[in-house]
Amino acid sequence: MSEKVSIGDRVMAAGFAAGWALVPLLPQRPTAAVFRLMADRVWRGRGKSVQRLESNLSRVTGLDADGAELRELSRAGMRSYFRYFHEIFRLPRMDRDEIVRRTHVTGAEHVHDTVASGRGVVLALPHMGNWDQAGAWLVAVGHPFTTVAERLRPESLFRRYVAFREGLGMEVLPLTGGDGHNFGTLATRLRKGGVVCLPAERDLTRSGVEVRFFGAATKVPAGPPLLAVQTGAALLPAVVYFDGDDWGIDIHEEVPVPAEGTRQEKVAAVAQSLVDVFEKGIAEHPEDWHMLQRLWLEDLSR
């Protein structure tokens, strides 16, 4: 059966295609200014995505949901979000040396030393900053990796996104619609001492692990903690953010797997420890947390 594609999906796919084709050919500063203007226009329109971002940020920061301070933070958040798109259009033509030079990393030794010892690494990230740029940095410093991508609509946009990420040096598995063996493939890569990078604070499968996140219940993907429990790979939380005109990555120490308990209990404990690290990183850089969807269970239940 052929895919049903809405006019909105077609416009979005055409916009992304034009972005990857045209933005790299134009001067950086003017195009960055255009993306900021677009972000401000969306922010002023205060549609559902902006309202959801403000609701999420209010929970994270404790700011008044109707206050001016939260509104300013959400504008910074939308500018950060649109900056991500501006940068991914330019990223395929960016020099690798520039990517490495402009990426300020703490904890890189946790990846380098673990891989050198022969163990696999699971890098788990919240949806922050420019995670594709962080992936480009990881490849540039000698660690090509495998990841899983949400299946976007239309299919042409998904294929273009996969091609973009593969062009940066990533191996990309589709979250849905593939051979159904993603976990086995990731486990194989890890057992061979490879690196896997996965988003880890929003469950898209309805089979996630329940955790407490900023004081309320939500579910996170089971994959990252389960891979650590099953394969013995090191699970390293990574927080990605914008550092002025450059980029920052904080790679934290390995999340330990409890020695006792059932597999389910171990996965739950590791998942909670993981989001505890995410909480700190998001609280430090709330404007760079791109969570424009419902996340907490009480919000989803509505």
Image (spheres, rainbow, N blue to C red):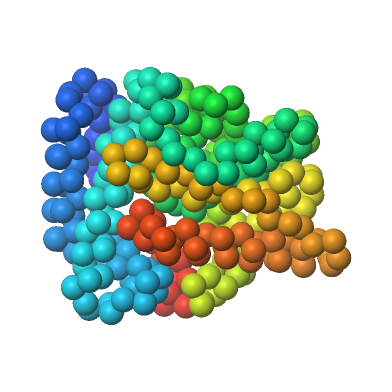
Residue 188: x and y, percent?
Answer: 75, 35
Q: Which residue: 49% across, 40% down? A: 105
In-front residue for pair 45/80: 80
Give the vertical position of 243 relative to 266 (above or below).
above
Quarter assignment of residue 29: top left
Q: Which residue: 43% across, 22% down? A: 96
Residue 205: x and y, percent?
Answer: 57, 56
Residue 204: x and y, percent?
Answer: 53, 56
Give the vertical position of 158 relative to 141 (above or below).
below
Residue 36: x and y, percent?
Answer: 18, 46
Q: Which residue: 76% across, 37% down? A: 119
Quarter assignment of residue 246: top left
* Label tally: 0
Q: In which quarter of the image is the C terminus?
A: bottom left
In-front residue for pair 63/98: 98
Q: List the single residue furthest toward the right.
A: 260
